Image: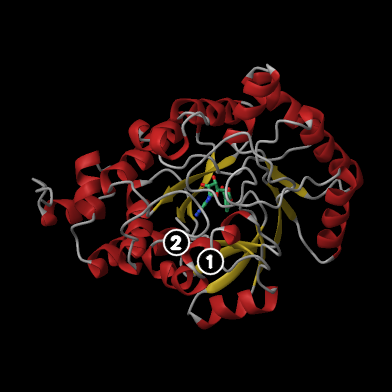
Amino acid sequence: MPKKYKVKKMDLTEKIKKAERLTQEEGEALYELDLFTLGELADDIRQERFGKKTYFNINRHINPTNVCADICKFCAYSASRKNPNQYTMSHEEILQIAQNSIEKGAKELHIVSAHNPYDGVEWYMGAFRKIREKFPDVHIKSMTAAEVDFLHRQYGLSYDEVLDLMIESGVDSMPGGGAEIFDEEVRAYLCKGKVSSKQWLEIHEKWHNRGKESNATMLFGHIESRANRIDHMIRLRDLQDKTGGFNAFIPLVYQRDNNFLNVKEYPTGQEILKTYAIARILLDNIPNIKAYWATSTINLALIAQEFGANDLDGTIEKEAIQSAAGAKSSNGMELEDFVALIKNSGFIPVERDSLYNELKVYD
Ligand code: V47
């Protein structure tokens, strides 16, 4: 039985036009608007802030190990689940990848690992130190809150100690991974034992309090409800009111292959676009809405530019987490192709750095 909302469509659109903040119930009611009304409302906000500019960066995703102590049902990457091919890179291998990518123009290394219980804190931190020593200018975006929590649980360090070690070792910003869905019941089913919602938010708050910036993700399109998505966004909005440290919100579309999550119904393209648009409207204090093309497909990411998204992540080069679950992102995208796709879709590609300073406008 579909839920009936007391919120009137007129009141909702008026409120959005007046830039008034929406509640949980109003957020849920947004899904009842037709796609084009919602798209127009989200696009108005996007155009006011960014015009036709779409941000991206030249980045390299590195996933140094897939050996994982945690068991998340949605994950196809972890070697302890359906992926039998375990690997852990040495520091030398990580440095070699970094060098190759930096020589080809990468300005950001986005480093995300599984929760490897065998190699110690020094394996994680030593890699950052060595990259920093050799490449002082590259931006290191690394350590999801789930990884921070794992090092805390496995090695008895406090969150403060892990975060300070990250800064000493050269990490510049934190990626948004590990947030999944904050609702406690859904989360317990998806990834019991991993960082809790409260802890995820606490870790980002502590990071922001150190003057550092981060992103926030939401994994959607599996077993969660629309209400769960709105709740997730509102918890992020509340923290952002306190710290202002989130640069971007990234709704990650669930990829279905090679994992242990039994999903009956997948979201339609319309539902995905609505979710981007709602994120743009609801998250009035997080500047950038990223359509991460690896999970949405590049085609839908380009359309998402009309539905509130102003950022498409980057060229990626290599990627192992989403592609293990079926995404077509294992070899990234060539810069020329990426720029041409954004241009041909009627937007202005703008290369940004990792903290959203503009580097080059391709007009
Ligand atoms: O937290 C795992 C997700 C995330 C699946 O901060 C899956 O700029 C879809 O956080 N289907 C890691 N997603 C990636 C991530 C990220 C990506 C791009 C940009 C940024 C950023 C961060 O990947 C995990 C998890 O939520 N994930 N399995 C799957 N089957």
Q: Is residue 20 visible?
A: no
Compared across the picture, whether 153 is left or right of 85 comes to left
Q: Going 28% across and 47% down the picture, which residue do you hit?
A: 225
Q: Going 41% across and 61% down the picture, which residue do you hit?
A: 46
Disc 2 residue: CB within 8 Å of ligand 1: no
- For badge 1, the amino acid type reads Thr
Residue 319 falls in image quadrant? bottom right
Q: Secondary structure at mark 2?
A: loop
Percent coordinates x, y for residue 302 in the rendering: 47, 72
Q: Secondary structure at mark 1?
A: strand
Q: Going 9% across and 52% down the picture, which residue do you hit?
A: 8
Kindly check if marks 1 and 2 are in contact, taking CB atoms under 8 A apart as contact: yes
Percent coordinates x, y for residue 85 in the rendering: 70, 52
Outermost residue toward the bottom in this view:
344
Q: Which residue is mark 1?
A: 54
Q: Which residue is mark 2?
A: 309
Distance from disc 1 to disc 2, alpha carbons, whole Å, reads: 8 Å
Compared across the picture, whether 35 is left or right of 363 comes to left
Disc 1 residue: CB within 8 Å of ligand 1: no
Check the image and tell me how it is coloured: secondary structure
Compared across the picture, whether 73 is left or right of 65 comes to left
Compared across the picture, whether 234 is left or right of 344 comes to left
Percent coordinates x, y for residue 300 in the rendering: 44, 71
- For badge 2, the amino acid type reads Ala
Residue 318 falls in image quadrant? bottom right
